[in-house]
Image: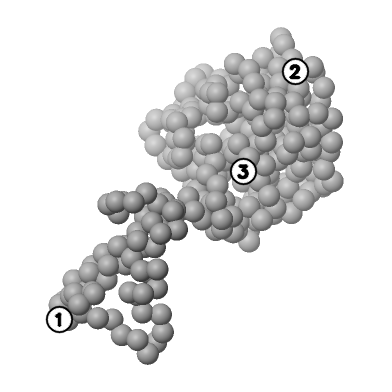
Amino acid sequence: MSFYTNFPLYPTETFSNTDYPAQADDTDTVYAALINALKTEIQACFNELGLLPKGKYTDVSARLKAISIAAGMCVPSPISQWKLNDNLLTAVILDAVGSNNGKYKDAAGDINTSTGSVTGKINEAINFDGTDQYAQIPDSADLEFPSGTNFALAVWVNVTGSSSGTRTAIVGKGYHDTSVNLPVYMLQYDPADSHRATFYLRNSSDVTKVVVGATSLNDGWHHVVGVKDGEEMRLYVDGVSDNTAVDIGGDYAYGVNSDDVYIGQHYNRYINGAIDDLRIYNIALTLAQIEAIYNSGNGTEDENPNI
């Protein structure tokens, strides 16, 4: 294999100026020549393994990332990731990896994200006042999960005051229209129940399943993850399981409706606190993947954290 043949493996070996031509008095030129030579060797190696298309070397970082994900070395990309660093003179909340941008709002309409920008768990976050502030993400097919589809919701939350009502939503879809029972997925915060998180699912037959957490969320930043995995639903807080899994009783559809995704609002109930790095996945995150996103309590905005 050319990679092993042409690239030195042992400290006693030296680089050949023939293989890696460079000017000894120009560090930048040496570095550039070495990188270009290494790219060529990687291309040749991957071609032999059948991992990359033959031909001109292009975009090794994207291809290496794909291989790393396939090998289980890093977390797959979410469908959408709202880093909530949007300290701008617009209401737009940007989706960092998808096309599901949203708006920051109150009862009067759109409000600039700069008015709600606060220090986050990672960089900045968006604050919600517990009275009438929320964020709204338009309905999209990739935010809906038909029967047989696994998914996960992951978010940092810092509850700082008294939220209105019980079980207000951190994030969810399908519950905003009170005139009809739609299939719902939702991560909730319940100030009336020891400030614990809940993961809430309701199918199209109006059968509801809930995992209630054990950890109080009213003492600083916490990482909350809800996972739907086949016929099972699980809740994690701060990188560990926060209660026993619940049997859903079937592999149903959730969020398959025309309702939008809402952040910080559940009917007329609003969360009081900051939300950061919200992610929605179309896979059932494993514990190792959740730990990678949690990052020993430091958090990360990396799209594909290493496991």
Marks 2 and 1, the one that precedes in the sequence: 1
Q: Amino acid at mark 3?
A: Val
Marks 1 and 3, the one that precedes in the sequence: 1
> How far apart in space, not on screen, are marks 2 and 1 (Cα)?
71 Å
Pointer 3 residue: 155
Q: Residues within 10 Å of mark 1 (few under 14, many from 20)?
A: few
Q: Nearer the viewer, mark 1 or mark 3?
A: 1
> How far apart in space, not on screen, are marks 1 and 3 (Cα)?
51 Å
Label 1 element class: loop
Q: Nearer the viewer, mark 3 or mark 2?
A: 2
Quadrant housing residue 141: top right
Marks 3 and 2, the one that precedes in the sequence: 3
Residue placed at 55% from the left, 47% from the top?
76
Label 3 element class: strand
User: What is the x, y in percent for residue 240?
Assistant: 74, 54
Residue placed at 28% from the left, 81% from the top?
15
Q: Residue furthest top?
A: 179
Residue placed at 58% from the left, 28% from the top?
143
Check if mark 1's residue and mark 3's residue have beta carbons within 8 Å. no
- Above or below, comparing residue 30 to residue 141 in the picture: below
Pointer 2 residue: 204
- Above or below, comparing residue 179 to residue 111 in the picture: above
> How far apart in space, not on screen, are marks 3 and 2 (Cα)?
26 Å
User: What is the x, y in percent for residue 6?
Assistant: 33, 74
Q: Nearer the viewer, residue 201 or 38?
A: 38
Q: Is residue 199 left or right of residue 297?
A: right
Q: Is residue 204 left or right of residue 6?
A: right
Q: Is residue 233 left or right of residue 299?
A: right
Pointer 1 residue: 25
Q: Nearer the viewer, residue 257 or 294?
A: 257
